[in-house]
Image (tube, rainbow, N blue to C red):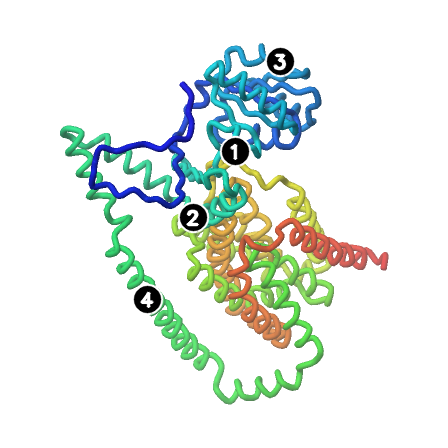
Amino acid sequence: MKLSEHNTTNTDTSLKINKEETNTLFPIFLKLEECKLLIVGGGNIALEKLKAVLQNSPKTTITLVAIEIKKEIWQLANEYATITIHQKAYDTSDLNNTNILLVAVNNISLSAIIKKEASAKNILVNVADTPDLCDFYLGAIVQKGNLKIGISTNGKSPTLAKRLKEIFNDTLPNELNEVLNNLNIIRNRLKGNFESKVTALNEITKVLSTKYTITISEKNKLNKKITIWFIIAIISIIAGFILSLVIPVEKTFMQSKSFLAQIDNRFYWMILVGFGVEMIAGSMGMGYGVICTSVLLSMNLSIPIISSSVHTSEMFGSAASTISHFRFRNINKKLFKTLAIPGIITAILGALFLIKFGNKYDYFLKPAIAFYTLFLGINILGKAFISNKIKPKKLKYVGWLGAFGGFIDSVGGGGWGPLVTSTIISKGRLPRYAVGTSVAAKFCITVASAFTFFTFIGISQWPIIIGLIIGGVIAAPMAARLTGKLPTKGMFIAVGLLVIGISLRIILKSLYII
């Protein structure tokens, strides 16, 4: 049977016919894995079509015919046993045992001939960039697990379809697949005839599309904002009261004068460092602790003071970044809890370990941590050259990941992002949710580390800390808005090279080479 564009009639006389131009294509989802597909062509367009098929229906039986074939196509054929390649000129016999045909040759006359021969055999045909020769179009696809949305512009603008795909991918949450699975379970458990089941499911899903839901959502947003600011106010009052008991007002005044007297060029330099580092960390979910630790190591400070300073300054920027990610709905609550709870426990243990042994083994820990930041820098740099097209995989041992990340972050002054955030992204999670959730969990871990250091050794190097805080708080809202929009590859390369360079300098200095 051949599909073609046509106008349909309707016996309902009450139906108003829209005389404006409209899309008359009939949307359909094929079980392509039960069909036999032929692709004619071996260039870039053929590769693009082949990837689209494999991404959506990887078990499809595919035959590809072309005289010249790109090496990437050969590589895909080696990965998928269902792909057969014939390196030769097209022949009419290639249409035998074919259900669907994709033509991707840079020759309109040849495309027209292939289309005519395929139509004679009732084969559905798509000819790249030639709508007049197409029986169907390949639309842009948005997929969230079992949910799949096709976007068609009636062949007018594939570019617009691609942009809409990006918008839907960023807007629709991954949790939709969970909703879909739950609805399937509910449907299977419902009793009664088909009509009663449809009625029940309509009632259940009505909440997803009614204006009432939108109104409630807006009220919930306002309530959440009020709750957040109320909690911040209460915490500030309690923190102020506790500090007033520990540090008398007179002493605070004297320390303020001392702080102002200590301000030097390092303070203004740290504002710039704090701003730049928070822009990187807030938008990529990694880099703050690693870069700050590398910079402070180069200033020849002790390991406990470095980690204490980094976590104290990071606490404020991380809080601002977490609030911003919360506003932009970038946080997965379930994943956040699984990461944060074990991470907090091990972060406290890591801080206690550093307090006890940090100064005693300073000569050993400094180059060791420099090697650690060097490894993280190489790791960050390597991620710039890993393909962005990652198939979603199930996250396993998330609690252990959070626990290990919390400990090494506390001891090494950083490392949560390169370890935890990159692992979550490598499993195919959207960058905005991976970064937002990781940043929120990191805030809790940072507070735990900073509080432990403050309790046992107090806080020093205030000019450095205040400078980092000011720069970080200014950058945090901008960084959250830029999440997923900056050139990821370029940022990974820049951050990786920066951390590698600083770490190598520290290692060479500790070995008395420079």
**Circle number at residue 222:** 4
Q: Quadrant of residue 8?
A: top left
Q: Which x, y percent locates residue 231?
A: 36, 69
Q: Secondary structure at mark 4?
A: helix
User: Does residue 151 appear to the left or right of 87 in the view shown?
Assistant: left
Query: Does dot 3 land on a helix, a strand or a loop?
Result: loop
Q: Quadrant of residue 314?
A: bottom right
Task: Say what amino acid the circle numbered 1 marks.
Answer: Pro
Give the CA distance from mark 1 to mark 3. Answer: 23 Å
Q: In this figure, which residue is indicated by the disc labeled 1? A: 131
Which one is in front, 223 or 202? 202
State how far apart marks 4 and 2 are (Cα). Answer: 24 Å
Q: Determine the residue positioned at 52% across, 41% down.
A: 158
> Does residue 48 sit above or below 323 in this rendering?
above
In the picture, measured across the screen, residue 120 lies left or right of residue 114, that is left
Instruction: Give x and y (percent) for residue 399.
Output: 46, 45
Could you tell me if the residues under marks 3 and 4 are in contact, i.e. CB atoms within 8 Å? no
